[in-house]
Amino acid sequence: MADTVILSGIEASNALYDSLHARIGALKEKGVTPGLAAILVGENPASQIYVRNKTKKFDSLGLKSDIYRLPEDTKEEELLELINKINNDDLFHGILVQLPLPKHIDSQKVIHAISPSKDVDGFHPENAGLVSIGNPRFIPCTPKGIMYVLKHFNVPINGKHVVVVGRSNIVGRPVSVLSSLKSMGNATVTICHSGTPDLKEFTTQADIVVAAMGSPEFLDASFIKDGACLIDVGINRIERDGKSVIVGDVNEASVTGKASALTPVPKGIGPMTIAMLVENTVLSAELSTN
């Protein structure tokens, strides 16, 4: 068996950014600068890092990005009022409300309040519905990034068996739909989850496994067949040798040499999620000029 190929999210995201320069330039010639409004409620350290990384990338590409920082005790009505204000502000083409929100705020109500035409996260029911019927406007960023990585590295999907482990509305469910669409993947798809008996029965049949269950290094060599491609969406912080380290849902050391290809953690799907947020915001700006 050949060496396991590392599917670098850094390499794939840089290719995406290169392809965006012409689109951004064309918009600026029309007097339009793609703009993102990022809303951060509370002091969650991970959320602050995520939002900072996202807005840094926007700034580096000459795009507009503003962060609205709200205190932890912000009332739901106040957040909804802010979203409504940004919905009606032509300077912003995308709205990102960083999850998770404080417990007293209904995240579904917040997602529903974002205008579908500015929902660059792709979480609004209207956009989820458009994805499910194969006519997407905004595809959720992580699933879109997964499909981009597979295409960038020429991993064949057409006619293959994709097994998705995890059924969240953010990753598992949409990536299972995208993989099955004739226009995007044309794969045969199985979706598994915590209630699936004998998970190995399914994953050992898969040509491509998407691991999105949030279980540190759970998926080892015994779960896959020779030559399978592994897409690791997990970001888990664990203690190892007295240090805090980030690992995925795949046990990389175990599957190396058996898997044909693997996305690393970190520097795999993480950078792709930010890249697709940028791309969705550019797309939203383009749609606003049509």
Image (cartoon, grey):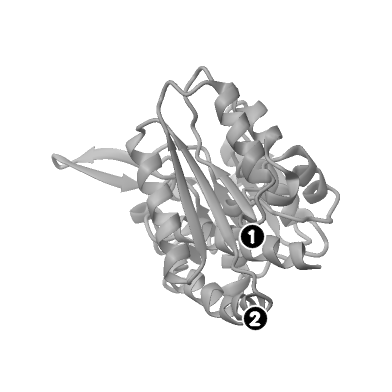
Q: For the view shown, which residue lies furthest in the top direction?
A: 104
In-front residue for pair 266/137 = 137
Residues under labels 2 and 1: Cα distance?
Answer: 19 Å
Q: For the view shown, which residue lies furthest in the left direction?
A: 242
Q: Position of residue 41 (x, y in %)?
A: 45, 32
Question: What amino acid is labelled 2 in the image?
Answer: Glu
Q: Residue at x 41, y 64 (%)?
A: 257
Q: Which residue is disc 1 drawn over?
A: 280
Question: What amino acid is labelled 1 in the image?
Answer: Asn
Q: Residue at x 67, y 42 (%)?
A: 123
In-front residue for pair 260/131 = 131
Q: Position of residue 51 (x, y in %)?
A: 43, 48
Q: Which residue is disc 2 drawn over?
A: 29
- Vertically, is 110 above or below 155? above
Inspect this view and state whether residue 4 appears: no
**Label 1 residue SS:** helix
Q: Say which quarter of the image contains residue 185.
A: bottom right
- Vertically, is 215 above or below 2? above
Q: Position of residue 131 (x, y in %)?
A: 78, 50
Q: Residue at x 47, y 63 (%)?
A: 58
Query: Mark 1 or mark 2, which is nearer the start of the sequence?
Result: 2
In-front residue for pair 68/272 = 68
